[in-house]
Image: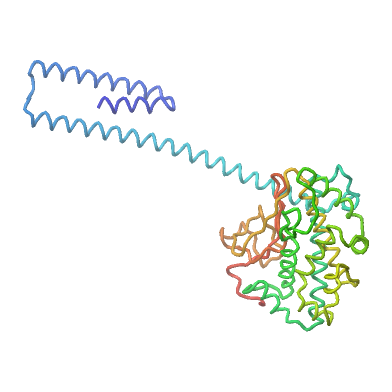
Amino acid sequence: MAGSAYAQLQFSQSPYDSDGIQKSDRLIVSELKKLSELKQGYLNKEFDTSPESSIMGAEIQEQRSLLRIYEITRKKMEHQLNLRLSELTLLREKLEELNKQNRLLVKRLNQTQSGPLNNPKSLQPFDLFTTQHFVMVLGSAVKSIRNFVRSMIVEMKSADWDIEAAASSIEPDVLYSKADHKCFVFESYVSREMFDAFQFPDFSLHNMSLPDKRLLKEFLLDKFHELRSTDPNNFLQREPKSEFAKFCRAKYLRLVHPRMESAFFGDLSQRKTVNSGKFPDGEFFALFAEMAKWVWLLHCLSLSYEPCVSIFQVIRGSRFSEVYMENVVEERSFPAPDSLENDALSVAFTVVPGFKIWEIIVQCQVYLLHPNFNQGSK
């Protein structure tokens, strides 16, 4: 019993409990007195000293002491659990507040700004390394992708392509709430191809002449300034062996399949021109070059940050998160996430990748699937 009293004393010390300490102290003194009386009784032969009685009495005392220790340990663990639960609640509240601040910041960055900063061509060197201007260049890249996709869909319709079959070949088994939402799957395809290997300085093309790591950031900044105010088609005609030209050549040949080009234009003349080291004329390639320009500029800019900007996308079936994702379709057919169960909204596919600049998340754009959605066109 003295052991259990000592355990109670330890428990009362953290957190400090003066009443508990005094109670434990009295209990320890009481137990010590009992031990002293037991010793005196044994010496004076005042109780039954038979082995059976002594063993049983000792076992009873030991079990009582163990029960007391277990009870004290249980109380101590309950106290520690309550402390951890309180800490967890505080951390959850702090996380929610940080998430709200992050969402507000990203929305503010995505808002159209007035004045010369709204034009990416007007950026000064000291303006470049801010989140706002990265988002601005990203916005121009996304706009150019959508312009190219719009032209591509027009060509597909003119060539009597089956739009539904083409969309299903990219992302099968997706139900769209509106027929014209199929444009998002083509945006997803183009974005995926254009941003593939974005995190590597050479886009994993292995045919670029890049400097070593010490000079890379300065080199990429020079390329950014070289191209940002230039018409990309004129630049390609003037610099057909430049790093940007190599990027355009590789991306065009990968993005525009020979079957697609043949259906659009009746032959593969544009592909042959690109393979020969030159670049074709025409609106379709001009839109491609404009898109390639903004992806290239964003690439140069992202690798010039310290640390470099990271890119991410989410896979199909991922649970929708407002922190990392933005619904590309803002409509009533998709209820607000707060009004649904945690797993009610899930991702069908990523349309535009997201980015992380320092600790700031620039949301990726996703097309969502609603688990209860049972109408619409395939």
**Percent x, y of residue 137:** 82, 54
> On the picture, is 197 further left or further right than 134?
left
**Percent x, y of residue 74:** 35, 37
Identify the residue shown where x is 74% and y is 50%.
106
Count of numbered tags: 0
> On the picture, is 241 further left or further right than 329?
right
> On the picture, is 260 further left or further right than 18?
right
Above/below status of 223 relative to 378 = above
Q: Nearer the viewer, residue 46 or 22?
A: 46
**Percent x, y of residue 333:** 67, 68
User: Considering the image in quadrants, where does the C terminus appear?
Assistant: bottom right
Q: Would you identify the image quadrant in which residue 19 lies?
A: top left
Indicate how the structure is coloured in the image.
Answer: rainbow
Q: Would you identify the image quadrant in which residue 269 lies?
A: bottom right
> On the picture, is 5 further left or further right than 107?
left
**Percent x, y of residue 324:** 66, 54
User: Considering the image in quadrants, where does the N terminus appear?
Assistant: top left
Q: Nearer the viewer, residue 313 or 242?
A: 242
